[in-house]
Image: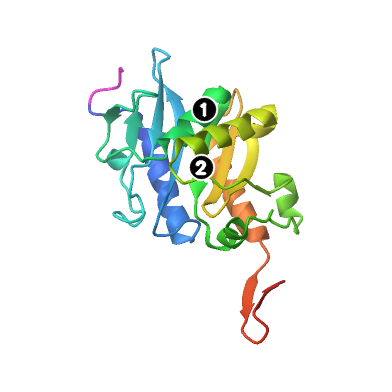
Amino acid sequence: MKFPAGRIPFEYEREDLARVVRTVMERRDTNIVGGNISIRVKDEEGKEYYVMTPTMMSEAYLGHLTADQILVIEPHTRKVISGNGKVTREINMHEAIYDVNPDIKCVFHSHADQSMFWATTGLNMPNLTEATQKLKEIRTLEWHPMCSEELAEYVSNEVKKLGDKALRNGFLLNSHGTLFTSGGKDMDLLRLYTSLLRMLTLRNGIPKLHWNKQNYNVMVH
């Protein structure tokens, strides 16, 4: 990789991702047990890498990451080219998604508090507001163990079925959290913020949940 003297590899992308992680944590769009975000990048020679959050981004760092803590990872070898931290076990899901659609530029997985109710029940999330209509169907996928190859293979197959729709898509992972994929041939500068916008759109469109202790039902309004 060739970069200007005094600059870390993919410095600006890593600064952006660190900023987004802080925003996601502060707005409770993920929780203390994590989530992971990656963007697909290329160097000046056209070689592909992943700019990705390290494992324990929430537990160890509380979402307060710096650019040099964001990893630059070589696909498939999972070699850390730059960055301080270890690769998340869920890189297999990110890799599998990128492999089935070369135009996907960002994989955004989090544990947003309101959406976790729907993910845990296994129900598709009600699409009730005008804003969330842009996300179309908000489907909960079948359960597979977190970080497993089974989950990576299953999710990538679901993404593959979507074709170009995967460039603007959101899923709920059963008992696990949210998963957004974003992309397009000319979306390099917007890939990360497009996924963040969809996360915030989903969060703002989720019906409020309250526990009714008298009849033991969840009230949705």
**Residue drawn at (63%, 54%) of the image:** 202
As measured in the structure, the alpha-carbon distance from the residue carrying label 2 to the one carrying label 1 is: 12 Å
What is the secondary structure assignment of the residue under circle 2? strand
Residue 43, picture quadrant: top left
Segment tinted magenta in the rendering: 1-5
Question: Relative to residue 41, is residue 44 depicted above or below?
Answer: above
Q: Which residue is mark 1?
A: 98
- Residue 67's disc number: none
Q: Position of residue 63 (x, y in %)?
A: 36, 54
- Name the kind of residue labelled 2 in the image: Phe
Using the image as rendered, state which of residue 186 and residue 92 is in the foreground. 92
Taking the image as shown, residue 144 lies to the left or right of residue 69, namely right
Q: Nearer the viewer, residue 67 or 140?
A: 140
Instruction: Identify the residue at the far bottom of this view.
Output: 214
Q: Looking at the image, which residue is at 34% across and 28% down?
A: 78
Residue beneath label 2, please? 108
Q: Amino acid at mark 1?
A: Tyr
Q: Can you give x and y, in whole percent of width and height, for residue 83 in the image?
A: 27, 35
Residue located at (43% from left, 42% from top): 147
Q: Specify how the rendered protein is coloured.
A: rainbow
User: Is 128 drawn above or below residue 89 in the view shown?
Assistant: below
